[in-house]
Image (tube, grey):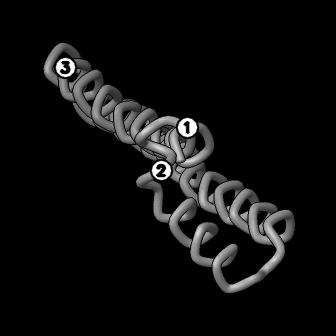
Amino acid sequence: MSPLVETSFFYRIALKSTVLGIKDKFFFKMIEAAKIIGAGAATAGVGGAGAGIGAVFGGMIQGYARNPSLKEQLFTYCILGFALSEAMGLFALMMAFLLLYAY
């Protein structure tokens, strides 16, 4: 087994459960369920990123409607806001994949 798995929190709990006599199959299924629930909770950040991107572009459209002469400056800020919001969504997705496949 890999050193990452052997040092995992869930793996150590499972080892303790075998010492105490708890059935392995049930406990490992509980661990898998906890991983899936955690990954699902981590994916909620992707929806927040989508809402953030919508708010950024909506704000740019409102700003452009109020003052069309600031088009270039508004677009620059819009792209920066889009990149930061998208990065947070990708970090949330990365955490979900880490929970599913690394532990």
Q: Residue at x 18, y 14 (%)?
A: 72
Q: Residue at x 65, y 57 (%)?
A: 35
The answer to whether residue 8 is visible is yes
Q: Amino acid at mark 1?
A: Met
Horizontal and vertical percent position of residue 61: 40, 31
- Label 2 element class: helix
Q: CA distance from mark 2 to mark 1?
A: 7 Å
Real-space Cα separation, disc 3 to disc 2, in angstroms: 47 Å
Q: Are marks 2 and 1 in contact (CB under 8 Å)?
A: yes
Classify residue 16 by image quadrant: bottom right
Q: Name the element at disc 3.
A: helix
Instruction: Bin the neighbour count of mark 3 within 10 Å (Cα to Cα): few under 14, some 14-19, many 20 and up.
Output: few
Say which residue appears at 28% left-offset and 22% top-offset: 79
**In the rendered view, would you say 26 is above or below 85?**
below
Q: Which residue is mark 1?
A: 1
Q: Quadrant of the N terminus?
A: top right
User: Which residue carries the number 3 mark?
Assistant: 76
Q: Is residue 1 above or below residue 41?
A: above
